[in-house]
Image (cartoon, grey):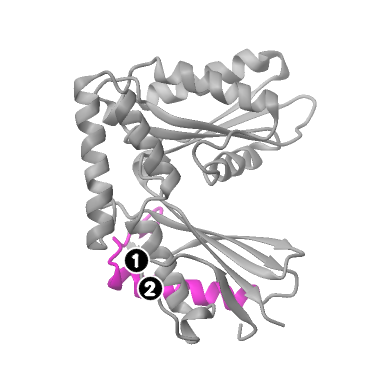
Amino acid sequence: MDSYRISEFNPYTQSTTEEDKMLNEKTIIDLLKKAECDLPEDVESALESAFEKEQNKIGRIQLKNILDNIRYARENSVPLCQDTGILRFYVRMAKGTDQNEIRDIINRAVEKATEDIPLRPNSVDSLKRDNLGNIPEIEFELTTDKFIEITAFPKGAGAENMSALAMLTPADGLGGIKKFIIETVKKAGGNPCPPTIVGVGIGGLSDTAMKLAKRALLRKVGNPSPDRETADLERKLLEEINSLEIGPMGLGGNSTSLAVHIETAPCHTGSLPVAVNLQCWADRRATVRISDTN
């Protein structure tokens, strides 16, 4: 990794040494600290806007508490939530980059970050329930770009547990899609710690739809789909979801969700998979880009 240097990243603690500009364990620890302790500007701005618009007294109190929590976490370098999540990384890299080396760096960094930040050791054996510490999930994407881009995306259980998949039929159409999404949010209630961001994946196979739903959450809040019809569907769904009056933390109000993000893929003529992946108000994510200096 000696030929790569950080070109885009606003780490939680700035450093100018040559070692800190390289892709190494410290880079990933700083990335995780940024994700865990400092909410992205677009999310905080959306929460502030929700506070200004919220009509419900209890809802306003909950939003104020959330905003105070965000500022406290940032100023004191502590995690935004006690559930520091399952640690998921999205890695975009040029063909020929050593995938195993990047995986090793991330794994070692996560082990150190668990103690240094600190992070709650959330990974357990799915059957025995034995605690395994923190085992990151890593999704790689090969590109023609001459840089490595790594996004840290911690995902808490409260929102993740509300995920849902429906294998609809083409006859269900747009009406069936909307009904499933609305019913999923309604059933989730206050469990995912609203205001939420609603990630939706439509198309592909069952696993494709769920991956799309989760990837939809990486989009900045307030950035609609580039497809006009999809963006219109996002807007209408958000209006309907907020009319449910589930409200902040499920205690009532018109701020149930901050955004609906939809990603689509082609699907079989006889299928219509739809997946919903909710994200809590703590929409934690941070990205670092390391450029090839050759």
Identity of the residue furthest to the right in this view: 269
Q: Is residue 105 left or right of residue 4?
A: left
**Where 55 sits versus 204, above or below?**
above
Residue with the mark numbered 2: 111
Residue with the mark numbered 1: 133
Quadrant in which the N terminus appears:
bottom right
- The x and y percentages for residue 150 are 55, 63
- The x and y percentages for residue 288 are 53, 65
Q: Amino acid at mark 2?
A: Glu
**Residues at circles 1 and 2 in contact by the CB criterion of under 8 Å:** yes
**Residue density around tag 1, few if under 14, some if 14–19, many if 20 or more, within 10 Å:** some
In this orientation, does residue 47 appear?
yes
Give the residue at x 46% y 71%: 28
Q: Amino acid at mark 1?
A: Gly
Q: Is residue 77 left or right of residue 177?
A: left
User: Is 120 included in the stretch rendered in magenta?
Assistant: yes
Q: Main secondary structure of the magenta part?
A: helix
Give the residue at x 66% y 15%: 172
- The x and y percentages for residue 104 are 52, 77
- Please report whichever mark, 1 or 2, sits nearer to the chain's N-terminal start: 2
- The x and y percentages for residue 64 are 22, 36
**Residue density around tag 2, few if under 14, some if 14–19, many if 20 or more, within 10 Å:** some
Is disc 2 placed on a helix, strand or loop?
A: helix
Residue range highlighted in magenta: 99-128
